[in-house]
Structures are given as C-alpha cells and as structure tokens.
Image: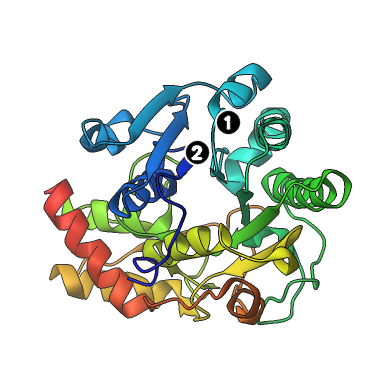
Amino acid sequence: MAYQDLVFPENSLFLVTGGAGFIGSNLCEAILSLGHRVRCLDDLSTGKQENVDFLKDRPGYEFLRGDIKDLETCKKACEGVDYVLNQAAWGSVPRSIEMPLFYEENNIRGTLNMMEAARQSGVKRFVYASSSSVYGDHPVLPKKEGQEGKLLSPYALTKRACEEYGSLYFRLYGLPTVGLRYFNVFGRRQDPDGAYAAVIPRFIRQLLHGERPTINGDGKQSRDFTYIDNVIEANLKACLAGEEAFGEAFNIAYGGREYLIDIYYDITKALGTEIEPLFGPDRPGDIKHSNADISKARKLLGYDPEYDFKRGIALAIDWYKRNLG
C-alpha cells in the first residue's frame, strides 16, 4: 500500500474526528497498523460503534464520544495531538437540502471549532475532508482546483466554507491546514442502508438480497469513484506535506470516469445475477458528470493512487459478500 512506508515521528498521536464512520474507521485502522496512536472522536450520530469495536483492544487506540459542535469537546480531543484528520460531518446532498440549518451548524461551525481547538493545541497538521461538490455547476471536465461554479446544495456550501476557513486559518494564524476534495469514495464499511446510502454499497446490498435497485436518473451520469485506500494515502501524505500545500485544497480521486449504468451491470455480473434496475427521477442538487484532475495533489502531496476502479470494486464486492451474507 502506498502509505505503508511513510515515516512519522515515533509514538505520534493522530486525532480522527468522525472516526467511527466509513472513512474515519479506515483511517484509524491504518494509523494503528503503522504503529502510531489514534484518538477516535465520534458522537455516533452517523458513525457506528461496530465500525471501530475491533480496534478497542489494540495498543494505542482511544475512543472519545463527543460532538464537534461543542468547542470544549474539541479542545479536549486535541490535547497532546500531533495530527488532526477531520472527517466529522454530515454527508448527503439531498439530506442537506432538507436540513440546511443543521448542516450549517454541524459542518461549518463544527469544523471551525476543530480548527480553533487545533490552533490552540499547536498541532503539526490539520487535514480536513472537503468534497467534489464544491465544483457545483461548472461544466468543464476534468475538474481542476480554482475552476469552481455555482454551488448546488447546502452540503456543497458547507464544504466550500470550510475550505475558506482552512485557507484563512493558515494565512491568519499559521495553522498548517490541508483540504481534501473527495470524489465519490467507496469501499469496506461504507453503510449500504438508509435513504441516503451511497450508490455502490446500496446496489450491492439490494442485489445480494434479491431486491431490484433504483437508479436515480437515466444511469448515464458519470463519477470518479475513488477506492478507500487511495483516500487513506492522501490523508497520511497530507500530514507530511510541506508549506506549499498549507491553506490549499486538493482533488482526491483516481482520475477515472465511470458511468452509473455500467457500474450497475458490472456489479450484477460479479454477483451472478441478472436483476434489471428501476429508474427514478434525478436527485436535486446532483451534478451530471464528475472527473478529477489530480495533478496538484500529485505534485504537492506526493499522492499516487494505487487502486483504479476495477481493482477497488472487486475488493469492495468481496468485502460485502463476506459481511452482508
């Protein structure tokens, strides 16, 4: 794996907020595998205890239940921390359209609380999750940092605001921030249930249970689906990035482009089923096509993703077959 050879000071302490979530739990596991300590902060509102239960007896693991909307909790979580990997946020474009006030409070104020706590604690790096949704309606592909359009959802606005705070906190206070614009991350432990579940695990779960999935739109929308291990690599390399990366945001993807209908049939083939999909209306706030230019992350973070879509989807399907049954 591209992050196994990274060298951090001995006994480094990482704080992973949203650590019981899909991406956060994978980061916690990876950090422990490198021999470092990790403090997992989560209020379990969207994260799941079972995502991190298998880590509880590992040396160097600590779980702290708390909410990033509370500044004192954030300060406590940052005590003695070297690196913050801030993943805590509420996702889902459609849900943000239904709950704009909550998204502002949780995603913007919560992230600002974490930046302030990290600043006061003198952490070495503050790496935070952003999103490809910040590109909004900008039509040009591939998506390139600095070429953003009009935002299409409250969720996208919260991520854009966090990027602005990240830039400001470096320029004004010297906090070494690095923003990561995730493009459609998928892989082990991603939640397949609920109305706002991501499309790949939802398809897999429904097909494994003989159900007929619904594709929103015509299935011809495209995405730069990004396997979880690429995201782990990006986060850890961002912790070692030089000053030229501070205050910046980076596309984190593989740099590919997959069409939803093709993915659906790839999954049915891998599962040995011939269930045809249903088609529903387009989801409000969604973009039609997404594909990332990752040259900036390659240059300034040393990001070099190992897992293309074909390799990642095979690993994901195998994990869900073993864990969903």
Which class describes the residues within 10 Å of circle 1: few (<14), some (14-19), or many (20+)? Answer: many
User: Disc 2 marks which residue?
Assistant: 15
Please name the amino acid that badge 1 sits on: Cys
State the image coordinates of residue 165 (x, y, percent, origin top left). 80, 45
Real-space Cα distance between discs 1 and 2? 7 Å
**Element carrying mark 1:** helix
Left or right: where 29 falls relative to 250: left
User: Disc 1 marks which residue?
Assistant: 78
**Element carrying mark 2:** strand
Can residue 152 be seen in this snapshot? yes
Between residue 216 and residue 14, name the one nearer to us.
14
Left or right: where 264 falls relative to 321: right
State if disc 2 and disc 1 touch (CB < 8 Å): yes
Question: What is the quadrant of residue 46 in the picture?
Answer: top left
Which class describes the residues within 10 Å of circle 2: few (<14), some (14-19), or many (20+)? Answer: many
State the image coordinates of residue 324 (x, y, percent, origin top left). 17, 47
State the image coordinates of residue 304 (x, y, percent, origin top left). 48, 78
Q: Is residue 139 above or below residue 316?
A: below
- Residue, x 73% and y 33% (percent of image)? 116
